Amino acid sequence: MTCKGCEIKEEAASFDVEELIAEQLSLEVNLVTPEILSQRLEACERCPFKSNHTCTKCGCFYKFRANLTVKNCPAGRW
């Protein structure tokens, strides 16, 4: 269990990351289909290199990278 201050900080950080990803994706043109995105995110969720919002293998926000047609999984999972 975390303290209230930490919970609030984690919540705010989570919101900021999601907002940043959405903002950047709105500028991208080569996005995968919803079906492919779903498959990629499922693989990311089970990946040992996932840490919070980040892929520790490459340093990217994994939800951002998974949306892009020109990107591969650095761990070879998709």
Image (tube, rainbow, N blue to C red):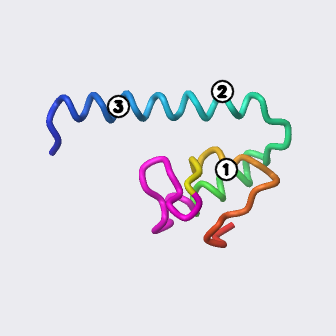
Query: Contact (CB < 8 A) between labels 3 and 1?
Result: no
- In primary-sequence order, the first of circles 3 and 1 is 3
- In primary-sequence order, the first of circles 1 and 2 is 2
Q: Which residues are magenta?
A: 44-58
Residue 77 figure quarter: bottom right
Residue at (64, 44) in percent of width and height: 64
The disc placed on residue 11 is: 3
SS for tag 2? helix
Number of numbered callouts drawn: 3
Amino acid type for the residue under numbered disc 2: Glu
Amino acid type for the residue under numbered disc 3: Glu
Looking at the picture, does residue 63 appear above or below residue 24?
below
SS for tag 3? helix
Q: Residue under circle 2?
A: 23
Q: Residue under circle 1?
A: 65
Q: Nearer the viewer, residue 49 or 36?
A: 49
Q: CA distance from mark 2 to mark 3?
A: 18 Å
- In primary-sequence order, the first of circles 2 and 3 is 3
Q: Quadrant of the N terminus?
A: top left
Q: Is residue 47 left or right of residue 31?
A: left
